[in-house]
Amino acid sequence: MANVFEGMEEGFRIFKNRDALSPHYIPSELPFREREISLLSRKIAPVLSGRKPENIFIYGKTGTGKTAVTKKVLSDLNEYARKKGLPVMGLYVNGRLHDSEYKVLVKVVKLIDPNMDMMGYSISAVNDKLLETVEGKELRLVVAVDEIDTVKRVSDLVYRLNRSNDEISRGSISLIGISNDPTFKDKLDARTRSTLCEVELVFPPYDAEQLRVILTQRAKEAFVEGAVTEDAIALAAAYAAKHSGDARYALLLLLRAGDIAEEEGAERVERIHVEKARKRVEEDIVYDMVSTLPEQHRVLLLALANMVLKKSGISGFSGEPVITSGLLYSVYRKTAEEYGLSPVSDRWFREYLNELQTYGIISVKVAGKGFRGNTRIVELNVDPSKLRSVIEKSL
DNA sequence: CATCCACCGGAAATAGGGGGGC
DNA sequence: GCCCCCCTATTTCCGGTGGATG
């Protein structure tokens, strides 16, 4: 019998290193972010000479390089500190995965020393452990909390970490908060805002030309030489520029175009593959947002998607149907029951709505005139039919 | 203009899961 | 194993809020 792998390398004539296009890949060079990198590192640099850096707030739309820049700067910081033998540590925590003051603290302790797992201990025990460790080792920490807007009761976290500096005689803890929600800063109370936002850094979206350069650079790493045309790259860049300059979208587009070219057995990635990739990328993005959500959130979204598709709602001024929260709640209840789930109370439903809004999947605004009282109108920010198919598959 | 309605969101109460100490 | 502690998710309770209604 012939070797089962016979001829299989044929499939790899498009990609050389597919990972280079993945959203998690951190390239060694970040074009058009030199200014941000140098600003951020300069603001952090005092930590190397034993002073506590100011807290930093980073804001920018998705796919503007906030995470990549932060990770790059932190990893350079760690490398430099290791080389010089300095007790300096840059830590990265994702707020969506660690969405409470408690979870962030536990994660920070675990990042300092992977053997320390404080899960289950009281928050004050975790905090004491953290302070004791920082003081004992004279650690100077820079803690970056990505997607900080998804952390519940952020102000408690910011306040606690900041106050820690007063309670220890040696070492320090500085914060970097990262958010893509433009309203997040306004939602903070004045004291938290002035604490967290001592320094602010805004990341602008990329334009089409910049995206083209970024894609070209990544394509060099990702594709076999000559396996992608400049045309295809330019088109992907143009689409992404329209998509609010989102580099992640651009990379995903090229990745999917490559997949499609490979599936079709094409020699190289051309414009047509980028065109075809668009649909799949839209689904990828919806899937990304939805797949990690709890069941109840998905049911709620399914109910909403169905309502949008059926256009069954209450008519506003202009006569076009709008979906009020109360109406959505009753549809959600029915949907939940259809799937054999017990629906949550209306109070918790409102909490879900707010969470989904911070995730950016839906928008909620007060109805105002034309509607009774504090009624809010819910809008879906993604394609309803794609959302429905993704959720139905997952339930 | 008083009252009603539809919903908002804080606070307290409750259930449950993880963990230590003995 | 039992008891108590802490965090988290969820329910229950309830006092707003602001436009609609008569």
Image: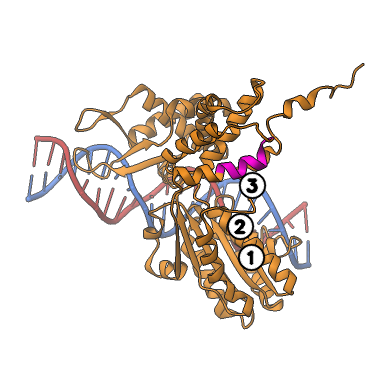
Chain colours: A orange, B blue, C red
**Label 1 – label 2 distance at C-alpha:** 9 Å
- Count how many numbered circles sit on residues in the image: 3
Q: Chain of mark 3?
A: A
Most distant residue in the top direction:
A1
- Image disc number at residue A90: 1
A290 versus A174 height, above or below: above
Q: Residues at badges 2 and 3 in contact (C-beta under 8 Å)? A: no
**Mark 3 residue crowding within 10 angstroms, few (<14) / some (14–19) / many (20+):** few
Q: Position of residue A274 (x, y in %)?
A: 53, 29
Respond whether the residues carrying marks 1 and 2 are from the same subunit.
yes
Q: Chain of mark 1?
A: A
Question: Amino acid under label 2?
Answer: Lys
Q: Say which residue appears at 65% left-offset and 66% top-offset.
A: A77
- Give the quarter of the figure containing the C terminus of chain A: top right
- Image disc number at residue A71: 2
Q: Say which residue appears at 38% left-offset and 54% top-offset.
A: A183
Instruction: Identify residue for label 3.
Output: A25
Question: Amino acid under label 3?
Answer: Tyr
Q: Position of residue C5 (x, y in %)?
A: 62, 64
A339 versus A177 height, above or below: above
Q: Chain of mark 2?
A: A
**Label 2 – label 3 distance at C-alpha:** 11 Å
Report helix, strand or loop for mark 3: loop
In the rendered structure, the answer to whether residue A124 lies left or right of residue C20 reads right
Q: Earlier in the sequence, mark 1 or mark 2?
A: 2
Magenta segment: does it hold A222? yes
- Magenta-drawn segment: A215-224
- Image disc number at residue A320: none
